[in-house]
Amino acid sequence: YSTELMMKKMKPQIYDEPGVFSWSKPLKDYAKVTASSDGKTGSSIKIDIERTVEPDAKIKAEFPRDDDTTGAFTIDACGITLKEEIPEVGGIKDKVDMYAFNLYIEDGTLSPEPLVLIHLEPGETISWTQRIEIEADQKSSSSQGAGVRAPVAAAFTANANGDAASRRSLS
């Protein structure tokens, strides 16, 4: 299992673990964490799970705030690749920004958590999209054909009154 968090800027300290030794276990005990940068599209942090996470273990890693990141990540597990992005982050007149990019892991869960911060004045409304693409490799595909692909887009709308709505569609 692995996940890759797409970052625009890389900080010297790759991640922090504020819950270690109180409620969570150290990420380094279960995974190899590497940072890379290609100089063109930005940086990424790859987390390769190297051992089984016990049923009572919980892991939480917090990555440095990066206002230029779109919250994109990729998860590879069990012959499935899941890609996610929030394309409008940082691009909607500075109304939707990345607030935090966390990773939560426990038995059966590998959960990147892109958190957005919404800036609205009274009466304002803003919309954004969270795009998720799921693809199976040839080995895990059904006998009907290889390369099963199911893109999903979720559109979100929020207003300054705290009301929120979401709409999902399969394409």
Image (tube, helix red, strand yellow):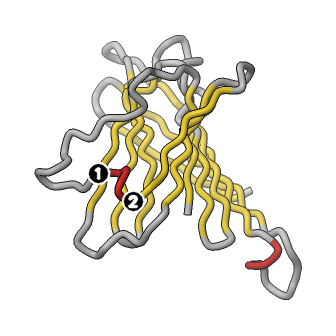
Q: Residue at x 60, y 66 (%)?
A: 77
Callout 2: SS:
loop
Q: Nearer the viewer, residue 138 or 130?
A: 138
Vertical position of residue 126 compared to residue 167: above or below: above
Q: Residue at x 31, y 15 (%)?
A: 122
| Residue 86 visible within the image | no
Q: Quadrant of residue 52?
A: bottom left
Callout 1: SS:
loop
Vertical position of residue 36 compared to residue 30: above or below: above
| Residue 38 visible within the image | yes
Amino acid carrying label 1: it is Pro
User: How far from the left and from the top, in percent, is residue 166?
Assistant: 48, 47
Q: Quadrant of residue 137?
A: bottom right
Q: Nearer the viewer, residue 70 or 4?
A: 4
Vertical position of residue 166 compared to residue 82: above or below: above
The residue lying furthest to the right in this view is: 145
Neighbourhood count class around disc 2 (C-alpha, 10 Å): few under 14, some 14–19, many 20 upward:
some
Q: Is residue 73 left or right of residue 134?
A: left
Mark seen at residue 30? 2
Q: Which residue is mark 1?
A: 26
